[in-house]
Image (cartoon, rainbow, N blue to C red):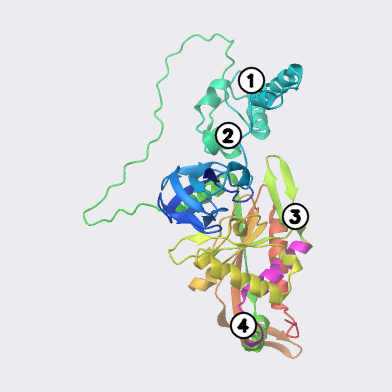
Amino acid sequence: MAEYKLLLPSMGEGVMEATIISWLYNEGDTVKEDESVVEIATDKVDSDVPTPVSGKIIKILKQKDEVAKIGEAIAILEVAGTEDGLAAQPQEPKSAEEVQTEIPNVDPDVVKGLEEAMESSKTATSFDGSDLYLSPLVKSIAQSEKISDNELQSIKGSGLEGRITKEDILAFVSNRTAPAAPQAAAVAPVAVAATPAPVSAPLKVGAGDEIIQMDRVRKIIADAMVKSKHTAPHVTSFIETDVTNVVKWRTKHKDLFEKREGEKLTYMPIFVKAIVKAIQDFPMINVSVDGDKIIKKKNINIGMATALPDGNLIVPVIKNADQLSLSGLAKAINDLSHRARNKKLRPEDTQGATYTISNVGGFGNLMGTPIIPQPQVAILAVGAIVKKPAVLETKDGDVIAIRNLMFMSHSYDHRVVDGSLGGMFLKHVHDYLQNWDLDTEI
Protein backbone atom coordinates (compact mmCIF):
# COMPACT_ATOMS: atom_id res chain seq x y z
CA MET A 1 0.00 0.00 0.00
CA ALA A 2 1.12 3.57 -0.59
CA GLU A 3 0.04 7.03 0.44
CA TYR A 4 -1.30 9.59 -2.02
CA LYS A 5 -1.62 13.30 -1.23
CA LEU A 6 -4.84 14.81 -2.56
CA LEU A 7 -3.92 18.35 -3.66
CA LEU A 8 -6.22 21.31 -4.12
CA PRO A 9 -6.32 21.67 -7.93
CA SER A 10 -6.08 24.91 -9.89
CA MET A 11 -9.38 26.79 -9.83
CA GLY A 12 -8.62 29.03 -12.77
CA GLU A 13 -6.75 32.26 -13.43
CA GLY A 14 -6.42 34.56 -10.43
CA VAL A 15 -7.72 32.06 -7.86
CA MET A 16 -5.02 31.35 -5.28
CA GLU A 17 -6.94 29.68 -2.46
CA ALA A 18 -10.25 28.08 -1.51
CA THR A 19 -12.30 27.47 1.62
CA ILE A 20 -13.39 23.97 2.59
CA ILE A 21 -17.21 23.94 2.76
CA SER A 22 -17.74 20.29 3.66
CA TRP A 23 -16.24 16.85 3.24
CA LEU A 24 -18.46 14.35 1.44
CA TYR A 25 -16.59 11.45 3.06
CA ASN A 26 -14.98 10.84 6.44
CA GLU A 27 -11.62 9.42 7.43
CA GLY A 28 -11.69 5.68 6.88
CA ASP A 29 -14.12 5.88 3.96
CA THR A 30 -13.21 4.39 0.59
CA VAL A 31 -13.54 6.56 -2.52
CA LYS A 32 -13.37 5.77 -6.21
CA GLU A 33 -11.42 7.51 -8.93
CA ASP A 34 -13.08 10.71 -10.23
CA GLU A 35 -15.53 10.70 -7.32
CA SER A 36 -16.17 14.09 -5.67
CA VAL A 37 -14.84 14.03 -2.13
CA VAL A 38 -14.98 17.63 -0.89
CA GLU A 39 -16.94 20.82 -1.58
CA ILE A 40 -14.90 24.02 -1.77
CA ALA A 41 -15.62 27.71 -2.27
CA THR A 42 -13.51 30.41 -3.89
CA ASP A 43 -14.26 34.09 -4.34
CA LYS A 44 -15.60 33.13 -7.77
CA VAL A 45 -17.72 30.02 -7.43
CA ASP A 46 -18.47 26.91 -5.36
CA SER A 47 -17.41 23.55 -6.76
CA ASP A 48 -16.50 19.94 -5.94
CA VAL A 49 -13.04 18.38 -5.96
CA PRO A 50 -12.79 14.83 -7.35
CA THR A 51 -10.05 12.40 -6.46
CA PRO A 52 -7.83 11.27 -9.37
CA VAL A 53 -7.20 7.89 -7.69
CA SER A 54 -9.18 5.25 -5.81
CA GLY A 55 -8.32 4.58 -2.19
CA LYS A 56 -9.16 5.03 1.49
CA ILE A 57 -9.07 8.43 3.18
CA ILE A 58 -6.68 7.99 6.09
CA LYS A 59 -6.17 11.63 7.02
CA ILE A 60 -8.10 14.86 6.35
CA LEU A 61 -5.60 17.72 6.49
CA LYS A 62 -7.97 20.66 6.00
CA GLN A 63 -11.15 20.80 8.03
CA LYS A 64 -14.43 22.58 7.31
CA ASP A 65 -14.09 26.40 7.04
CA GLU A 66 -10.28 26.17 6.77
CA VAL A 67 -8.51 27.81 3.82
CA ALA A 68 -6.19 25.86 1.53
CA LYS A 69 -3.84 27.24 -1.12
CA ILE A 70 -3.79 25.94 -4.68
CA GLY A 71 -1.46 22.92 -4.83
CA GLU A 72 -1.63 22.31 -1.07
CA ALA A 73 -2.44 18.83 0.25
CA ILE A 74 -5.94 18.65 1.75
CA ALA A 75 -6.10 14.90 2.47
CA ILE A 76 -4.02 11.72 2.40
CA LEU A 77 -5.34 8.58 0.74
CA GLU A 78 -4.13 5.02 1.09
CA VAL A 79 -3.99 3.46 -2.35
CA ALA A 80 -3.13 0.05 -3.71
CA GLY A 81 0.27 -0.56 -5.26
CA THR A 82 3.66 1.03 -4.70
CA GLU A 83 4.87 4.60 -5.03
CA ASP A 84 6.15 3.82 -8.53
CA GLY A 85 2.66 2.73 -9.57
CA LEU A 86 1.03 6.03 -8.62
CA ALA A 87 0.19 8.80 -11.02
CA ALA A 88 2.72 11.62 -10.88
CA GLN A 89 1.82 14.34 -8.41
CA PRO A 90 2.90 17.97 -8.44
CA GLN A 91 5.75 18.37 -5.99
CA GLU A 92 6.86 21.33 -3.94
CA PRO A 93 9.97 23.05 -5.32
CA LYS A 94 13.13 21.38 -4.11
CA SER A 95 15.89 23.26 -2.35
CA ALA A 96 19.32 23.65 -3.85
CA GLU A 97 20.68 21.13 -1.32
CA GLU A 98 18.09 18.54 -2.39
CA VAL A 99 18.96 19.08 -6.04
CA GLN A 100 22.65 18.59 -5.30
CA THR A 101 21.89 15.42 -3.29
CA GLU A 102 19.77 13.97 -6.08
CA ILE A 103 22.35 14.88 -8.75
CA PRO A 104 25.72 14.22 -7.15
CA ASN A 105 27.73 15.35 -10.20
CA VAL A 106 26.33 18.89 -10.22
CA ASP A 107 28.92 21.63 -9.87
CA PRO A 108 28.70 23.26 -6.38
CA ASP A 109 29.43 26.65 -7.98
CA VAL A 110 26.32 26.22 -10.14
CA VAL A 111 24.23 25.50 -7.04
CA LYS A 112 25.69 28.56 -5.30
CA GLY A 113 24.89 30.68 -8.36
CA LEU A 114 21.30 29.45 -8.36
CA GLU A 115 20.94 30.26 -4.68
CA GLU A 116 22.31 33.78 -5.20
CA ALA A 117 19.98 34.33 -8.17
CA MET A 118 16.95 33.19 -6.15
CA GLU A 119 17.92 35.43 -3.24
CA SER A 120 18.49 38.44 -5.49
CA SER A 121 15.11 37.93 -7.16
CA LYS A 122 13.45 37.99 -3.74
CA THR A 123 15.33 41.12 -2.75
CA ALA A 124 14.40 42.81 -6.00
CA THR A 125 10.69 42.53 -5.17
CA SER A 126 11.01 43.94 -1.69
CA PHE A 127 10.87 47.62 -0.86
CA ASP A 128 14.09 49.31 0.18
CA GLY A 129 15.00 48.14 3.67
CA SER A 130 11.66 46.43 4.15
CA ASP A 131 10.76 42.81 4.69
CA LEU A 132 7.50 43.37 2.79
CA TYR A 133 7.14 41.72 -0.60
CA LEU A 134 5.48 44.05 -3.10
CA SER A 135 4.43 43.64 -6.69
CA PRO A 136 6.23 45.90 -9.19
CA LEU A 137 3.07 48.02 -9.56
CA VAL A 138 2.63 48.51 -5.78
CA LYS A 139 6.34 49.24 -5.40
CA SER A 140 6.15 51.83 -8.20
CA ILE A 141 3.20 53.56 -6.53
CA ALA A 142 4.99 53.55 -3.17
CA GLN A 143 8.08 55.12 -4.71
CA SER A 144 6.20 57.75 -6.73
CA GLU A 145 4.13 58.76 -3.68
CA LYS A 146 7.23 58.77 -1.44
CA ILE A 147 5.68 56.35 1.02
CA SER A 148 8.15 55.53 3.75
CA ASP A 149 8.98 52.05 5.01
CA ASN A 150 7.21 52.80 8.30
CA GLU A 151 4.06 53.82 6.43
CA LEU A 152 4.17 50.63 4.35
CA GLN A 153 4.38 48.59 7.53
CA SER A 154 1.20 50.28 8.76
CA ILE A 155 -0.86 49.31 5.70
CA LYS A 156 -3.03 46.27 6.30
CA GLY A 157 -2.88 44.16 3.15
CA SER A 158 -6.00 42.43 1.83
CA GLY A 159 -4.16 40.17 -0.61
CA LEU A 160 -2.93 36.61 -0.26
CA GLU A 161 -1.05 36.12 3.03
CA GLY A 162 -1.74 39.75 3.91
CA ARG A 163 0.13 41.19 0.95
CA ILE A 164 -0.52 44.79 -0.05
CA THR A 165 -2.60 45.06 -3.22
CA LYS A 166 -2.92 47.96 -5.63
CA GLU A 167 -6.30 48.84 -4.09
CA ASP A 168 -4.79 48.83 -0.56
CA ILE A 169 -2.01 51.27 -1.41
CA LEU A 170 -4.28 53.54 -3.50
CA ALA A 171 -6.73 53.69 -0.60
CA PHE A 172 -3.84 54.61 1.71
CA VAL A 173 -2.72 57.37 -0.66
CA SER A 174 -6.23 58.82 -0.96
CA ASN A 175 -6.61 58.91 2.85
CA ARG A 176 -3.14 60.29 3.43
CA THR A 177 -3.32 63.88 4.63
CA ALA A 178 0.28 64.78 3.75
CA PRO A 179 3.49 63.03 2.69
CA ALA A 180 5.72 61.88 5.50
CA ALA A 181 8.39 64.38 6.52
CA PRO A 182 11.97 63.41 5.56
CA GLN A 183 13.44 61.38 8.39
CA ALA A 184 16.74 63.28 8.28
CA ALA A 185 15.16 66.66 8.98
CA ALA A 186 15.14 67.64 12.64
CA VAL A 187 12.01 69.52 13.62
CA ALA A 188 11.41 71.23 16.93
CA PRO A 189 8.54 69.65 18.82
CA VAL A 190 5.31 71.62 18.62
CA ALA A 191 2.33 71.06 20.84
CA VAL A 192 -0.62 70.19 18.63
CA ALA A 193 -4.02 69.05 19.80
CA ALA A 194 -4.59 65.51 18.61
CA THR A 195 -7.57 65.05 16.29
CA PRO A 196 -9.26 61.74 17.03
CA ALA A 197 -10.01 59.54 14.06
CA PRO A 198 -13.71 59.39 13.22
CA VAL A 199 -15.40 56.43 14.80
CA SER A 200 -18.73 55.06 13.63
CA ALA A 201 -21.37 55.16 16.31
CA PRO A 202 -22.28 51.68 17.50
CA LEU A 203 -25.50 50.49 15.94
CA LYS A 204 -28.25 50.05 18.46
CA VAL A 205 -30.19 46.80 18.33
CA GLY A 206 -33.74 47.21 19.47
CA ALA A 207 -35.98 44.70 21.16
CA GLY A 208 -37.22 42.17 18.64
CA ASP A 209 -34.55 43.04 16.06
CA GLU A 210 -32.98 40.03 14.37
CA ILE A 211 -29.23 39.85 13.77
CA ILE A 212 -28.34 37.93 10.61
CA GLN A 213 -24.71 37.08 9.96
CA MET A 214 -23.63 37.62 6.35
CA ASP A 215 -22.78 34.38 4.57
CA ARG A 216 -19.51 33.98 2.68
CA VAL A 217 -20.91 34.96 -0.72
CA ARG A 218 -22.63 38.06 0.65
CA LYS A 219 -19.35 39.18 2.26
CA ILE A 220 -17.55 38.77 -1.06
CA ILE A 221 -20.25 40.75 -2.89
CA ALA A 222 -20.15 43.50 -0.25
CA ASP A 223 -16.36 43.82 -0.43
CA ALA A 224 -16.40 43.85 -4.24
CA MET A 225 -19.06 46.56 -4.41
CA VAL A 226 -17.30 48.82 -1.91
CA LYS A 227 -13.94 48.28 -3.63
CA SER A 228 -15.44 49.14 -7.03
CA LYS A 229 -16.89 52.41 -5.72
CA HIS A 230 -13.52 53.31 -4.17
CA THR A 231 -11.66 52.38 -7.35
CA ALA A 232 -13.78 53.82 -10.16
CA PRO A 233 -15.59 57.17 -10.33
CA HIS A 234 -19.00 56.03 -11.55
CA VAL A 235 -21.05 57.95 -14.10
CA THR A 236 -24.43 56.65 -15.31
CA SER A 237 -26.24 57.59 -18.54
CA PHE A 238 -29.86 56.68 -19.29
CA ILE A 239 -31.90 56.19 -22.44
CA GLU A 240 -35.43 54.99 -23.23
CA THR A 241 -35.67 52.57 -26.12
CA ASP A 242 -38.60 51.47 -28.24
CA VAL A 243 -38.21 47.69 -28.39
CA THR A 244 -41.52 46.96 -30.13
CA ASN A 245 -39.74 45.24 -33.03
CA VAL A 246 -37.76 43.10 -30.59
CA VAL A 247 -40.98 42.04 -28.82
CA LYS A 248 -42.71 41.22 -32.13
CA TRP A 249 -39.70 39.24 -33.39
CA ARG A 250 -39.41 37.18 -30.20
CA THR A 251 -43.17 36.50 -30.12
CA LYS A 252 -42.94 35.23 -33.69
CA HIS A 253 -39.96 32.90 -33.08
CA LYS A 254 -40.08 31.72 -29.45
CA ASP A 255 -42.41 28.72 -29.90
CA LEU A 256 -40.68 27.51 -33.06
CA PHE A 257 -37.26 27.93 -31.44
CA GLU A 258 -38.27 25.96 -28.33
CA LYS A 259 -39.73 23.17 -30.47
CA ARG A 260 -36.62 23.04 -32.67
CA GLU A 261 -33.90 23.48 -30.06
CA GLY A 262 -35.56 22.46 -26.80
CA GLU A 263 -34.48 25.85 -25.41
CA LYS A 264 -36.45 28.90 -24.35
CA LEU A 265 -35.86 32.10 -26.29
CA THR A 266 -35.58 35.04 -23.88
CA TYR A 267 -34.77 38.68 -24.58
CA MET A 268 -31.23 38.33 -23.20
CA PRO A 269 -29.61 36.93 -26.40
CA ILE A 270 -30.97 39.94 -28.31
CA PHE A 271 -29.62 42.39 -25.73
CA VAL A 272 -26.22 40.67 -25.75
CA LYS A 273 -26.10 40.74 -29.56
CA ALA A 274 -26.75 44.51 -29.52
CA ILE A 275 -24.05 45.03 -26.87
CA VAL A 276 -21.51 43.02 -28.88
CA LYS A 277 -22.20 45.12 -31.99
CA ALA A 278 -21.79 48.34 -29.98
CA ILE A 279 -18.50 47.08 -28.49
CA GLN A 280 -17.25 46.41 -32.00
CA ASP A 281 -18.16 50.02 -32.83
CA PHE A 282 -16.50 51.35 -29.65
CA PRO A 283 -13.73 48.90 -28.61
CA MET A 284 -12.44 51.28 -25.90
CA ILE A 285 -15.42 50.19 -23.78
CA ASN A 286 -13.91 46.68 -23.78
CA VAL A 287 -10.89 47.60 -21.63
CA SER A 288 -9.43 47.35 -18.13
CA VAL A 289 -7.27 49.75 -16.13
CA ASP A 290 -3.95 48.83 -14.52
CA GLY A 291 -2.45 51.86 -12.80
CA ASP A 292 -1.85 54.38 -15.60
CA LYS A 293 -2.16 51.72 -18.32
CA ILE A 294 -5.26 50.84 -20.33
CA ILE A 295 -5.51 47.20 -21.40
CA LYS A 296 -7.60 46.82 -24.55
CA LYS A 297 -9.17 43.36 -24.59
CA LYS A 298 -9.05 41.22 -27.70
CA ASN A 299 -11.94 38.94 -26.74
CA ILE A 300 -15.51 40.06 -26.07
CA ASN A 301 -16.66 38.11 -23.01
CA ILE A 302 -20.04 39.21 -21.65
CA GLY A 303 -20.76 38.79 -17.94
CA MET A 304 -24.40 38.13 -17.10
CA ALA A 305 -25.50 39.09 -13.59
CA THR A 306 -27.67 36.24 -12.29
CA ALA A 307 -29.76 36.21 -9.12
CA LEU A 308 -29.51 32.99 -7.09
CA PRO A 309 -32.32 31.31 -5.13
CA ASP A 310 -30.62 32.24 -1.83
CA GLY A 311 -30.76 35.94 -2.71
CA ASN A 312 -27.09 36.24 -3.64
CA LEU A 313 -25.66 37.17 -7.02
CA ILE A 314 -23.19 35.56 -9.39
CA VAL A 315 -21.92 36.61 -12.82
CA PRO A 316 -21.28 33.74 -15.26
CA VAL A 317 -19.49 34.70 -18.46
CA ILE A 318 -20.43 34.15 -22.11
CA LYS A 319 -17.00 33.63 -23.67
CA ASN A 320 -16.31 35.01 -27.16
CA ALA A 321 -19.87 36.28 -27.48
CA ASP A 322 -19.01 37.97 -30.78
CA GLN A 323 -18.48 34.56 -32.36
CA LEU A 324 -21.92 33.20 -31.42
CA SER A 325 -25.15 33.39 -33.41
CA LEU A 326 -28.43 34.32 -31.74
CA SER A 327 -29.15 30.62 -31.37
CA GLY A 328 -25.71 30.03 -29.86
CA LEU A 329 -26.15 32.93 -27.46
CA ALA A 330 -29.55 31.61 -26.36
CA LYS A 331 -28.10 28.18 -25.61
CA ALA A 332 -25.07 29.58 -23.79
CA ILE A 333 -27.22 31.92 -21.68
CA ASN A 334 -29.72 29.21 -20.75
CA ASP A 335 -26.95 26.78 -19.86
CA LEU A 336 -25.08 29.27 -17.66
CA SER A 337 -28.29 30.44 -15.95
CA HIS A 338 -29.39 26.88 -15.19
CA ARG A 339 -26.01 25.83 -13.82
CA ALA A 340 -25.68 29.04 -11.79
CA ARG A 341 -29.01 28.46 -10.03
CA ASN A 342 -28.13 24.82 -9.36
CA LYS A 343 -24.55 25.53 -8.16
CA LYS A 344 -23.02 23.64 -11.07
CA LEU A 345 -20.78 26.38 -12.45
CA ARG A 346 -17.09 25.67 -12.93
CA PRO A 347 -14.52 28.25 -11.78
CA GLU A 348 -13.70 29.19 -15.38
CA ASP A 349 -17.41 29.97 -16.00
CA THR A 350 -17.15 33.11 -13.85
CA GLN A 351 -13.81 34.45 -15.07
CA GLY A 352 -12.63 36.69 -17.88
CA ALA A 353 -15.64 38.99 -18.38
CA THR A 354 -14.83 42.18 -20.28
CA TYR A 355 -18.30 43.79 -20.10
CA THR A 356 -21.40 42.98 -18.04
CA ILE A 357 -25.18 43.21 -18.43
CA SER A 358 -27.70 43.20 -15.58
CA ASN A 359 -31.42 42.63 -16.17
CA VAL A 360 -33.14 44.62 -13.43
CA GLY A 361 -36.34 44.43 -15.46
CA GLY A 362 -36.67 40.82 -14.36
CA PHE A 363 -37.70 42.16 -10.95
CA GLY A 364 -40.19 44.62 -12.42
CA ASN A 365 -37.82 47.60 -12.08
CA LEU A 366 -37.84 50.35 -14.70
CA MET A 367 -34.15 51.20 -14.33
CA GLY A 368 -31.15 50.97 -12.00
CA THR A 369 -27.67 52.38 -11.46
CA PRO A 370 -25.43 49.30 -11.69
CA ILE A 371 -21.99 49.08 -10.05
CA ILE A 372 -19.08 48.22 -12.33
CA PRO A 373 -17.53 44.78 -11.74
CA GLN A 374 -13.78 45.37 -11.44
CA PRO A 375 -11.56 45.33 -13.45
CA GLN A 376 -14.11 46.12 -16.18
CA VAL A 377 -14.94 49.73 -16.95
CA ALA A 378 -18.65 49.59 -17.79
CA ILE A 379 -21.92 47.75 -17.17
CA LEU A 380 -25.39 48.01 -18.73
CA ALA A 381 -28.68 47.54 -16.86
CA VAL A 382 -31.88 46.87 -18.83
CA GLY A 383 -35.24 47.63 -17.23
CA ALA A 384 -38.72 46.19 -17.58
CA ILE A 385 -40.44 46.35 -20.97
CA VAL A 386 -43.61 48.39 -20.50
CA LYS A 387 -46.39 49.29 -22.93
CA LYS A 388 -46.80 53.09 -23.15
CA PRO A 389 -48.31 55.66 -25.48
CA ALA A 390 -45.56 57.17 -27.60
CA VAL A 391 -45.31 59.73 -30.39
CA LEU A 392 -44.39 58.23 -33.78
CA GLU A 393 -43.32 60.22 -36.80
CA THR A 394 -44.98 59.05 -40.02
CA LYS A 395 -45.10 60.42 -43.56
CA ASP A 396 -48.60 61.65 -42.77
CA GLY A 397 -47.55 63.40 -39.56
CA ASP A 398 -47.07 62.54 -35.91
CA VAL A 399 -49.34 59.95 -34.30
CA ILE A 400 -49.69 58.48 -30.82
CA ALA A 401 -49.40 54.70 -30.63
CA ILE A 402 -48.99 52.02 -27.99
CA ARG A 403 -45.35 50.90 -28.01
CA ASN A 404 -43.10 48.62 -25.93
CA LEU A 405 -40.57 50.88 -24.20
CA MET A 406 -37.59 50.03 -22.01
CA PHE A 407 -35.07 52.10 -20.05
CA MET A 408 -31.37 51.27 -20.19
CA SER A 409 -28.75 52.55 -17.72
CA HIS A 410 -25.06 52.56 -18.58
CA SER A 411 -22.56 52.99 -15.72
CA TYR A 412 -18.94 53.60 -16.71
CA ASP A 413 -15.56 54.37 -15.17
CA HIS A 414 -14.89 58.07 -15.70
CA ARG A 415 -11.13 57.52 -15.37
CA VAL A 416 -11.04 56.15 -18.92
CA VAL A 417 -14.58 56.47 -20.29
CA ASP A 418 -15.75 60.04 -20.83
CA GLY A 419 -19.38 61.07 -21.28
CA SER A 420 -19.06 61.14 -25.05
CA LEU A 421 -17.81 57.55 -25.31
CA GLY A 422 -20.17 56.23 -22.63
CA GLY A 423 -23.13 58.06 -24.16
CA MET A 424 -22.40 57.12 -27.78
CA PHE A 425 -21.97 53.47 -26.82
CA LEU A 426 -25.37 53.49 -25.11
CA LYS A 427 -26.95 55.22 -28.11
CA HIS A 428 -25.62 52.53 -30.43
CA VAL A 429 -27.09 49.75 -28.25
CA HIS A 430 -30.35 51.73 -28.34
CA ASP A 431 -30.24 52.02 -32.15
CA TYR A 432 -29.57 48.32 -32.68
CA LEU A 433 -32.54 47.37 -30.50
CA GLN A 434 -34.94 50.06 -31.73
CA ASN A 435 -34.20 49.22 -35.38
CA TRP A 436 -34.23 45.44 -34.91
CA ASP A 437 -34.83 43.72 -38.24
CA LEU A 438 -38.03 41.64 -38.11
CA ASP A 439 -36.52 39.35 -40.77
CA THR A 440 -33.50 38.45 -38.58
CA GLU A 441 -32.83 34.70 -38.75
CA ILE A 442 -32.23 32.48 -35.78
Magenta stretch secondary structure, dominant? helix
**Residue 260 appears left or right of 215:** right
Separation of residues labelled 1 and 3 (CA atoms): 37 Å
**Residue 149 appears left or right of 66:** right
First along the sequence among labels 4 and 1? 1
Q: Amino acid at mark 1?
A: Asp
First along the sequence among labels 1 and 3? 1
First along the sequence among labels 2 and 3? 2
Determine the residue located farthest toward the bottom in the rendered image. Answer: 396
Question: Is the Cβ of the residue at disc 3 closer than 8 Å to that at disc 4?
Answer: no
Q: Which residues are magenta?
A: 259-280
Residue named by callout 2: 169
Residue drawn at 62 percent across, 48 percent down: 87
Quadrant location of the C terminus in the rendered image? bottom right
Counting from the top left corner in percent of width and height, residue 7 is at 55, 45
**Residue 190 appears left or right of 392:** left
Residue named by callout 4: 262
First along the sequence among labels 2 and 4? 2
Q: Amino acid at mark 2?
A: Ile
Between label 2 and label 4, give the one nearer the viewer: 4
> Which SS class for mark 4?
loop
Residue named by callout 1: 128
Residue named by callout 3: 284
Question: Is the Cβ of the residue at disc 4 closer than 8 Å to that at disc 1?
Answer: no
Question: Is the Cβ of the residue at disc 2 closer than 8 Å to that at disc 1?
Answer: no
Instruction: Compare residues 348 and 363 and report the one nearer the observer.
Output: 348
> Could you say which quadrant of the image residue 34 lies in?
bottom right
Q: Amino acid at mark 4?
A: Gly
Separation of residues labelled 2 and 3 (CA atoms): 27 Å
Separation of residues labelled 2 and 4 (CA atoms): 51 Å
